[in-house]
Amino acid sequence: MGLDLCHTNRFAALDLSAPNNNRNSVLLRVAEVNPTDIENPEYFHKVVDCQYACPAHTPVPEYIRLIAAQRYTDAYMINWRSNVFPGILGRTCDRPCEPACRRVRVEEEPVAICRLKRVAADNKGAIEDRLPDIPTQKNGKRIALIGAGPASLTVARDLAPLGYIIDIFDNQFAGGGMMRSQIPAFRLPIKVLDEEVSYILQRGVNATFDVEVDSLKSVLDKNYDAVFVGTGAPRGKGLNLPGLEDAMDNVHLGIDWLSSVAFEHTESIGKRVLVLGGGNTAMDCCRTSKRLGGEDVRVVVRSPFEDMKASPWEKEDAMHEGIPIYNNHVPKEFVVEDGKLVGMHFEKVEAQYDEDGKRSLVPTGEDLVFMEADDVLMAIGQENAFPWIERDLGIEFDKWDMPVINEVTFQSTNEKVFFGGDAAFGPENIITAVAHGHQAAVSIDLFCNGEDVTQRPAPGVTLSSQKMGVHEWSYDNAIETDQRYVVPLAPLEESLSDRKMEVELGFDPATGYKEAERCLNCDVQTVFEETRCIECDACVDICPTDCITFTENGEEEELRTRLAAPAGNLAQDLYVSETLPTKRVMVKDENVCLHCGLCAERCPTTAWDMQKFLYNVTQAGQPV
Amino acid sequence: MSYQLPKFRHPDLPVNDLGYTKADYEGAISTLCAGCGHDSISGAIVRSCHELSIEPHKIAKLSGIGCSSKSPTYFLGQSHGFNSVHGRMPSVVTGAALANRDLLYLGVSGDGDTASIGMGQFAHAVRRNLNMVYIVMNNGCYGLTKGQDSATADEGSASKKGDPSLWGAIDLCATALQMGATFVARSFSGDKEQLVPLIKAAISHRGFALLDVVSPCVTFNNNPESTKSYEFVREHAEATGTVDFVPLRKEITTDYKPGTAQEVTMHDGSSLHLYKVDESLNPFDRRSALNTIEDHREAGSILTGLIYIDEDSRDLHDLMETSQRPLNELDESDLCPGNKMLQNINASLR
Ligand SMILES: Cc1cc2nc3c(=O)[nH]c(=O)nc-3n(C[C@H](O)[C@H](O)[C@H](O)COP(=O)(O)OP(=O)(O)OC[C@H]3O[C@@H](n4cnc5c(N)ncnc54)[C@H](O)[C@@H]3O)c2cc1C
Ligand SMILES: Cc1ncc(C[n+]2csc(CCOP(=O)(O)OP(=O)(O)O)c2C)c(N)n1
Ligand code: SF4
Ligand code: SF4
Ligand code: SF4
Ligand SMILES: [Mg+2]
């Protein structure tokens, strides 16, 4: 007697009413998760956590692999195309990519994405021959850019190769905006700044420096086809406390003081310095003070330490230089003796939080604290100021006196005038200014071609298999457990005695390689092809982080409770397949996938493949 | 090819009563073919032992020769292991179990290792009701030696490169029942929902527990002409019913309609809930179990699930009234009670 080998009634044994499977509940379910549409570029883009978090969406893992391959110039150019200032950003970026890095979900520290960028910049070869050609035959359109900070420079870089005639105006003596006037040279050497600014300004752009634009109307009257406002948020906020008038000579606005140091108008400061404020400006002020003669330099901040706006590493750097941070101290008055500032009074407070988590600083009732000071630097914030923009040009301003700007197109209510960088929505950072610049350039290009600025060209996306052999991949799929490497610093004493000496030395190539190997290659996507799957469970069994489950479909919230491992990170998507022959679906929680490729290695039918997803943000001049 | 499993694990892996995660029960990365059913069974063993909170050093995993017998390397990396000779695993377990009754013996074998070269050893281990879990990773072929038909290959079934088998298959469940097995179950590597509770039940059973797990050999015996392929097994598997395993001191969370579930209390105090059981099968009756196996064979379907359990099973130690303290813990004073005792014994024999 032989067994029945007829295959007419496939999978009948897994009929929903079959006794052996708990699948009856399927019939009761209302909503099921739709199969994931991996054709939508945003699905895999989101899986590349760092790139997704980067305002300019730099293809991070792509350049990190090139660094590991010692292809520094190629790595630099990927960055240059995307974020325009790799050498500058590799030292100064606010790095929103790092907290987003997948690595922090499986261990303590993210990949040192930012400092790897610097490795590419430090070790690259000549790049001039890789820069885009600037046509000598112009396209006849004239664009004015006001301000020469990173936002305007990005617009210039994107539009110049398309043949636009570009005129930049700035009130400083050279380009770079706050990257030149604010960021101290010990964090950003002038040479690095000059180099990357020159890649733009020396290539077919007309720049006029030392000129204050005091009327937008006069610019518009020159019949430009479009105007970009990239003037930043140039006004420092002050504190009008009792005693200020008499103390005035020794009380300075942080950003004004930093630029006067940068431009060499100020070369010293008193021995005892109080820096008021808890943001990055305060950190730059205190560290600069230490280098200009300050001995007892203190940062005094109203909020608790953890709530300070400064990035954790900026605080660490300041404390490393022997600068104490006094938190929960609210400044009350300037104390003046014999017409001269001698110190300040502070009220001690503690933070209390209401039910909604809203904080209030409540005085503790202790005596006022007196701190001696020869100089006080106020670094409590910056704001925008547009006194030079006439209010009858069709540019609408809101109740906070900020221009009304479209968040996608960066166009103002005067269709010819675009804003970007800190000028658009208030102070942010360099990478945000760059991201705005790219988008504004796209808009200006569309606008000048008579096209609709809201019809944005799609991002450039490619998906390509990394398979080299049966079990071989063209990326390094082994997962390194190395802890994050620490960037070496110059000796403290030396760097404190020279304001221009760079504190961080950067990774050497060997350390850079090891750090690069920590990257999990999140852009190498796990791509599932259901028609090939025989539901053997091999991928489920091998996956080190229990990403994959075969189960019945269901409503997402409930489905998440039935997966191989807890799937509580709602910010991370589920990749859900079409229904398989056993009536189940494949569900992959993207949360802690290591992109190790083991699922694809263990799949007997190559239903899984590892495919590199390259996502390039739309830039000006791309076809719609 | 990856030779190492990444060290990172899901940060929120559940911990068991011992504070261990599933990762603490894993072994080395498998070198079996991608998609081999044996790897899924290894995964099910890992899950079962973790969920049962068994201390890894209280388990001994033993095997013979074959792809299946290699698999103990790929689970329970912190447990004792012995990779023995082809078909001889039962003897080694017998010796080990006599020396130390306190370990959980997990025998892993293949259909070749068990139904051919090891048939005699298997039969006697069953007959003696050795207290062990005996898992056969049954792919109907000799995977390791490139896919020759084994004695569990069904008549008419053909492997990828082979001709249809001329002989009928040895049904290991039926054989074990004939030999006096006290726990017999069959499952499928591709159905962990069924396999995991069965492994847990087998672990809790006192005596010989056979788990015959159909486990496709993707490389040599997963073709349409084979009755041990993923597709064929999925199409033809018919479960005896559903098994829920509830460990001791754990709350029963499933609601069973009155009269639908049968409860079995295991030796260690945990319980088995059998429900939606095939009406023709009485899993407490050997004759009924044998009949049901035969009925399904005739109908051309593969009977899976718990087939037979003897609730009053008495294992080898019970029958031989061996010392409650493991033999390997008895020292000289226990084993040489002295001259006076010897005189007494001699006197009693005069
Ligand atoms: C102390 C400090 C430290 C900082 N450190 C960092 C850091 O480490 N990393 C980081 O990412 N960001 C940092 N930032 C923020 C960053 O510098 C800004 O977000 C960024 O430079 C904004 O770029 P932007 O192009 O919008 O404008 P800006 O860089 O502000 O450039 C605007 C330019 O326009 C000029 N301008 C303004 N008005 C006129 C006018 N009417 N006529 C002519 N010219 C005009 C300005 O002088 C300036 O040159 C820091 C800011 C400060 C204050
Ligand atoms: C004494 C002896 N005879 C023969 C062999 C050759 N041999 C190695 S594995 C094997 C069969 C294994 O088949 P099975 O137990 O079903 O394991 P599988 O590889 O299919 O999992 C044989 C015959 C051997 N190793 N030792
Ligand atoms: S690549 Fe595959 S095996 Fe590796 S972690 Fe991601 S899902 Fe798991
Ligand atoms: S390993 Fe491949 S065939 Fe097996 S279940 Fe996973 S995707 Fe499907
Ligand atoms: S040969 Fe067959 S049994 Fe052996 S590892 Fe490969 S698939 Fe598994
Ligand atoms: Mg076999």
Image (cartoon, coloured by chain):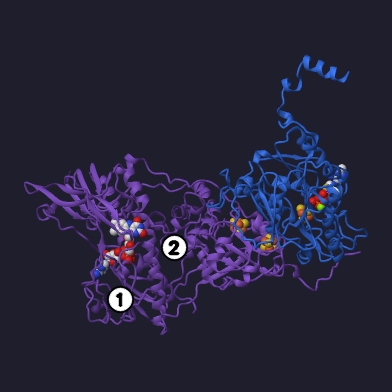
Choose between A568 and B18: the one closer to the eye.
B18
Q: Amino acid at mark 1?
A: Val
Image location of residue B65, percent across then percent down: 81, 45
Q: Residue at x 39, y 68 (%)?
A: A154
- Rendered image quadrant of residue B80: top right
Image location of residue B258, percent across then percent down: 66, 62
Q: Which residue is mark 2?
A: A54
Task: Specify the farthest residue to the right.
Answer: B166
- Rendered image quadrant of residue B214: bottom right
**Left or right of A435 in this view: A267:** left
Pointer 2 chain: A
Image location of residue A423, percent across then percent down: 30, 69
**Left or right of A265 in this view: A43:** right
Choose between A284 and B242: the one closer to the eye.
B242
Q: Relative to A9, is B62 above or below?
A: above
Pointer 1 chain: A
Image location of residue B32, percent across then percent down: 74, 52
Q: Residue at x 85, y 60 (%)?
A: B159
Q: Amino acid at mark 2?
A: Cys
Q: Which residue is mark 1?
A: A404
Chain given the colour blue: B
Q: Colour of chain A?
A: purple
Report if the beta carbon of the residue with label 2 is closer than 8 angstroms to ligand 1: no
